[in-house]
Amino acid sequence: DGGITQSPKYLFRKEGQNVTLSCEQNLNHDAMYWYRQDPGQGLRLIYYSQIVNDFQKGDIAEGYSVSREKKESFPLTVTSAQKNPTAFYLCASSPRDRAYRYTFGSGTRLTVV
Amino acid sequence: AQSVTQPDIHITVSEGASLELRCNYSYGATPYLFWYVQSPGQGLQLLLKYFSGDTLVQGIKGFEAEFKRSQSSFNLRKPSVHWSDAAEYFCAVDGAQKLVFGQGTRLTINP
């Protein structure tokens, strides 16, 4: 079955270390997205990509970086510059220009200690 | 810019009671609107969506929502809630290539 996989489900890192969250999809979707979720703040867009080798900043891109070298993969790196990285991170994908057909991953909870 | 507001952060209802979750949006054109549900530690599941046409849309799990352009609202309703409806609910608008989400409403069900 097609789907979108985020790994790992739980991730712990020491403060000051970079960490990369994985997101892989086999839905043949062109577009992929990263959201951050904090209690009471909903989902805020970090980065999105409509096509391979191209991506755009979302509302809260500072302290994060992404790459889109393959259609299936959109990894997110949380850098040491992100001041408050502990959060729940959700990845999603959709056909290009069809945001109404989002498919979500099950998320990665990152805890920085 | 597009935005979505969910005025209620937390709502508690009794099992069997009716439910209405509020959502207001800001969007220049005719919006595509969505309601999602999230169980703890999980991704989001689509409950229903509005594109055009009939302003009352039916979704899964017995939910419905009504689009009111004059009030810029898209409220979610259910006639009788079940304990399994306890979750977080998100309203979203299609903001040109990406979804813009509200803050979410956490629903607690009293037995």
Image (tube, grey):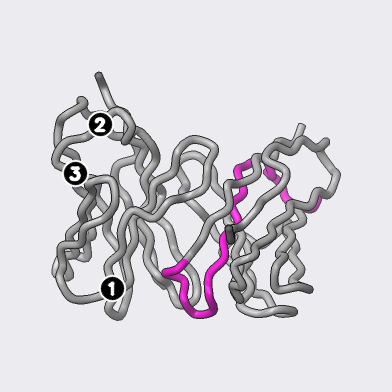
Quadrant the N terminus of chain B occupies: bottom left
| Residues at circles 3 and 1 in contact by the CB criterion of under 8 Å | no
**Lower position in the chain sequence, tag 1 or tag 2:** 1
Q: Are marks 3 and 1 on the same chain?
A: yes
Residue tagged by mark 1?
B51
Q: Position of residue A40 (x, y in %)?
A: 45, 41
Look at 80% across and 37% down and name the residue there. Answer: A13
Q: Chain of mark 1?
A: B
**Residue at which label 2 appears:** B82
Single out the mark in the foreground, 1 or 2.
Answer: 2
**What crowding class fits label 3: few (fewer than 14 Cα within 10 Å), some (14-19), or many (20 or more)?**
some
Residue under pointer 3: B78
Q: Where does residue B40 sit, x and y in percent of width and height?
A: 49, 35
Residue drawn at point x = 59 percent, y = 72 percent = A29
Identity of the amino acid at label 2? His
Q: Quadrant of the C terminus of chain B?
A: top left
